[in-house]
Amino acid sequence: MRYLVELDTIAGQITLGPFDTLEAARKYLAGIRGPIRPLWPPAADPAELIESHSKDDLIKKLEKI
């Protein structure tokens, strides 16, 4: 799965990326607050995503795409 990072600047919102993993997007932000948005649609079975039992399980399923 790939991700985008959104930053609110004085000049307005900017979107950066894509980042290949959630960890790479988090590392890029390095403590700066900003939303991380997944690029959709993921190439995963929707039923498998719905059956995820935790956030970590869901991220694992999305990262292997």
Image (cartoon, grey):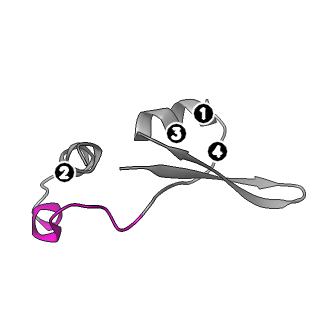
Residue 29, percent across and down?
62, 36
Verify CB contact (< 8 Å) between mark 4 and mark 2.
no
First reached walking from the N terminus: tag 3 or tag 4: 3
**Local SS, label 4:** loop
Residue 20, percent across and down?
44, 41
Residue that label 4 marks = 33
Verify CB contact (< 8 Å) between mark 2 and mark 1.
no
Q: Amino acid at mark 3?
A: Ala
Q: Amino acid at mark 4?
A: Arg
Residue drawn at x 20%, y 61% is 44
Q: Is-magenta flag for residue 43?
A: yes
First reached walking from the N terminus: tag 3 or tag 2: 3
Which of the two discs, 1 and 4, sits closer to the camera? 1
Q: Residue furthest right?
A: 11
Residue 25 bears which disc, if any? Answer: 3
Between residue 64 and residue 37, name the one nearer to us: 64
Verify CB contact (< 8 Å) between mark 1 and mark 3.
yes
Between residue 20 and residue 26, name the one nearer to us: 20
Residue 6, percent across and down?
64, 54
Which of the two discs, 3 and 2, sits closer to the camera? 3
Residue drawn at x 12%, y 54% is 53
